[in-house]
Every structure is written in structure tokens, then in C-alpha cells.
Image (cartoon, rainbow, N blue to C red):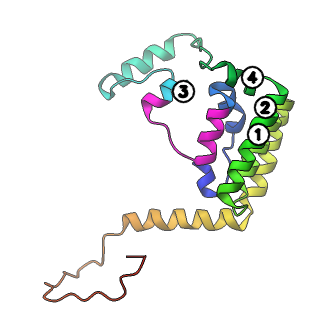
């Protein structure tokens, strides 16, 4: 959800996720910031297994004792293979992603554009170049006023969720209520 804070996934996230689940699915997740439920994450290939809480520790121990699991590549249609595995296909895919992203953000949020650029760099020039581009873009984004304000909103809403009201004050019983306004905001 870093994009919702005006940032991009760091620590190699923009480079590892596309290689793990495919460029298109990774871009979709990174650009929207939407989380994947457990079963979705398993289907995408992000996690190896989904188990009930009651057996979690036992299964985790078994996984830790096994050697590194062999991962199957995500199933892709012929069209997706052409888009993700060929130069012209990638160019078209990244171009369309930029167009769709700009249509939604109207250029007001820099993070989505940087996410696409960094993924493209990594997929075209290799992991090392992608990691370098990711680090540079993260450094730029963290200093933008958009990111600062989005982080402020996040922290403010997090604090508001903890709010319990005023201590020592009991609510009065209401006899009459008046509504002032009643416009779009409620």
C-alpha cells in the first residue's frame, strides 16, 4: 500500500514481485495499493501455502526444515506471454499502463509514474539497474509534498481510530436534534 502514502515499494519490492507473479499483476497491485487476501496471494504465487491458525506453527516448522520450495511460474495466456516476454510487448504494456495511470491521477500523484518507470527499468535493464532506480525514486518520492501530506493523513486517521472520546464526561440524554446543512458531506 506504499502508493497510498505517495511512495513506492522499497527493499527490492518493485523488482521481486514482477518476477514472482508477472509484470501485469504486480503493477496492478503496486499501483492500486490493494492487498491480496490469503487465497488470492496463494493463487498469484506470492505465498507458498495457506493454513488455518490452529496448525500454523506446525506447518511453519515443516516449511523451515524443507529445502527451498520449487515455484511454478504463474500460468499466462499466449497474449500475456507476448506482452511480458517481448520488447515490443513490454513497451506497449508500459505505455498503456502510463496512459491509464495518468488518466486516473491527472498527474497529481508522482508515485504511480515512478512505480511504472522503476519496474520497466528493472525488467529491461536487469535487477541491479532496477534496484538502483528503485532506491533513487524512493529517495525522491519521500521528499515530495504529496507524499508528506498523504503520510500526514494516514497518521491522523490512525490516531482518530484510537479516539475514545473525552474522559470523565458522560453523554447527556437528547430531547431534540437539529440538522444544519445536510449537503454532500453528510
Can residue 175 be seen in this snapshot?
Answer: yes
Dot 2: what SS? helix
Q: Earlier in the sequence, mark 4 or mark 1?
A: 4
* Label located before the other in sequence (3 or 4): 3
Q: Mark 4 and 1 residues: CB-CB less than 8 Å, in contact?
A: no
Q: Which quadrant of the structure image shows residue 171?
A: bottom left
Q: Which mark is residue 94?
A: 1
Residue 82: which numbered mark, if any?
4
Asked if residue 35 lies in the magenta stretch, the reply is yes
Q: Which residues are magenta?
A: 24-40
The residue lying toward the viewer, choosing from 178 and 100, is 100
Q: Position of residue 125 (x, y in %)?
A: 86, 31
Reading the image, the residue beneath label 2 is: 90
Q: How many marks?
A: 4
Q: CA distance from mark 1 to mark 2?
A: 6 Å
Q: Nearer the viewer, residue 84 or 65?
A: 84
Q: CA distance from mark 4 to mark 1?
A: 13 Å
Reading the chain from its start, which is encountered first: label 2 or label 4?
Answer: 4
Which residue is denoted by mark 3 in the rendering? 44
Answer few, some or many: residues within 10 Å of disc 1's Cα (few below 14, many 20 plus, some between 14 and 19): many
For the point 44% across and 14% down, the residue is: 62
Circle 2/circle 4 CB separation < 8 Å? no
From the viewer's perspective, tell me whether residue 139 is left or right of residue 41.
Answer: right
Q: Given contact means CB atoms under 8 Å apart, are the residues at marks 1 and 2 in contact?
A: yes
Tag nearer the camera, 1 or 3: 1
How dense is the environment of label 2, judged by Cα within 10 Å: few (below 14), some, or many (20 and up)? many
| Viewer can see residue 130 | no
Amino acid at each position: 500500500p506504499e502508493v497510498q502514502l505517495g511512495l513506492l515499494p522499497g527493499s527490492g519490492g518493485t523488482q521481486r514481485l514482477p518476477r514472482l507473479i508477472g509484470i501485469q499483476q504486480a503493477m496492478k497491485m503496486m499501483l492500486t495499493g490493494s492487498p491480496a487476501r490469503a487465497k488470492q496471494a496463494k493463487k498469484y504465487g506470492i505465498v507458498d501455502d495457506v493454513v488455518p491458525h490452529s496448525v500454523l506453527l506446525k506447518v511453519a516448522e515443516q516449511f523451515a526444515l524443507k529445502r527451498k520450495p520449487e515455484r511454478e511460474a504463474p500460468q499466462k495466456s499466449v497474449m500475456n506471454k507476448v506482452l511480458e516476454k517481448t520488447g515490443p510487448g513490454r513497451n506497449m504494456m508500459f505505455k498503456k499502463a502510463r496512459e491509464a495511470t495518468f488518466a486516473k491521477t491527472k498527474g497529481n500523484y508522482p508515485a504511480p509514474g515512478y512505480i511504472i518507470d522503476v519496474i520497466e527499468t528493472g525488467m529491461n535493464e536487469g535487477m541491479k539497474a532496477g534496484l538502483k532506480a528503485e532506491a533513487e525514486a524512493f529517495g525522491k518520492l519521500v521528499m515530495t509534498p504529496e507524499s508528506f501530506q498523504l503520510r500526514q493523513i494516514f497518521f491522523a486517521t490512525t490516531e482518530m481510530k484510537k479516539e475514545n472520546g473525552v474522559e470523565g464526561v458522560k453523554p447527556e440524554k437528547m430531547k431534540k436534534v437539529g440538522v444544519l446543512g445536510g449537503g454532500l458531506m453528510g
